[in-house]
Image: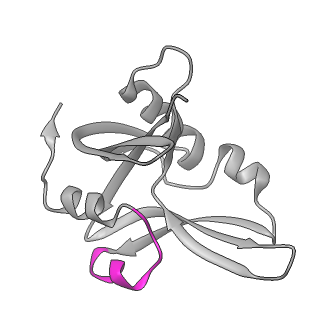
Amino acid sequence: MDKRISVRGIIIEDDEVYTIFRRKIRNDGVIKEYYVISGGGIENEETLQEALKRELKEELSIDVDIIGYLGLDEGENSIAHFFKCRIVNGLPMLGGEELERCSRENYYEVRKVNIHNLDNIDMLAKDMVMKAYNNEFVKL
């Protein structure tokens, strides 16, 4: 089975990282809350950078410059590539499929999280956020 390849863009401003907060309410009433770094899958013959710019435009309604490559996180079924980015146009606000699917039971919200509070939230890829914060990337 081929692994799903995705891209994620880490944007940090003034010690805060842009995230998408998720709240899911299951049919049994259990509430799951967590944060994700924006991004998504590669389509057709896109490069990693093309996919990342498209995903951030769709999800956050922004245009970005890609500053550098932070590395990848490989799981059993997926490979996620992480990049440090900078906003060049727009103000981050929910867009695309996330906005269309947003409901009380399946809630999405753009939130800035202080870097020093990462240990207090449920979020994968905290190590990549810290690499971005510490400028530990390969310049593109």
Q: Quadrant of the C terminus?
A: top left
Percent position of residue 95, x then y: 65, 48
Q: Residue at x 45, y 69 (%)?
A: 123
- Number of numbered discs visible in the structure rendering: 0
Closer-to-camera residue (70/100):
70
Q: Is residue 23 magenta?
A: no
Q: Residue at x 57, y 55 (%)?
A: 93
Taking 11 as reference, is 28 above or below it?
Answer: below
Residue 72 lies, with reference to residue 48, above or below; the image says: below
| Main SS category, magenta section | helix
Q: Is residue 121 magenta?
A: yes
Place residue 66 in its image quadrant: top left
Quadrant location of residue 120? bottom left
The chosen color scheme is one colour
Q: Position of residue 57 (x, y in %)?
A: 52, 38
In the figure, is residue 114 to the left or right of 25? Answer: left
Return the x and y of residue 130 as percentages of the image width and height: 23, 64
Say which residue appears at 27% left-offset and 81% top-offset.
116
Q: Which residues are magenta?
A: 115-124
**Residue farthest to the front?**
1
Quarter of the image with the N terminus in it: top right
- Residue found farthest to the right: 27
Q: Is residue 113 left or right of residue 68?
A: right
Give x and y (percent) for residue 89: 42, 41
Q: Residue furthest bottom?
A: 120
- 91 up-or-down from 14: above or below: above
Rendered view: 58 above or below 120: above
Residue at horizontal 47 percent and vertical 46 percent from the top = 76
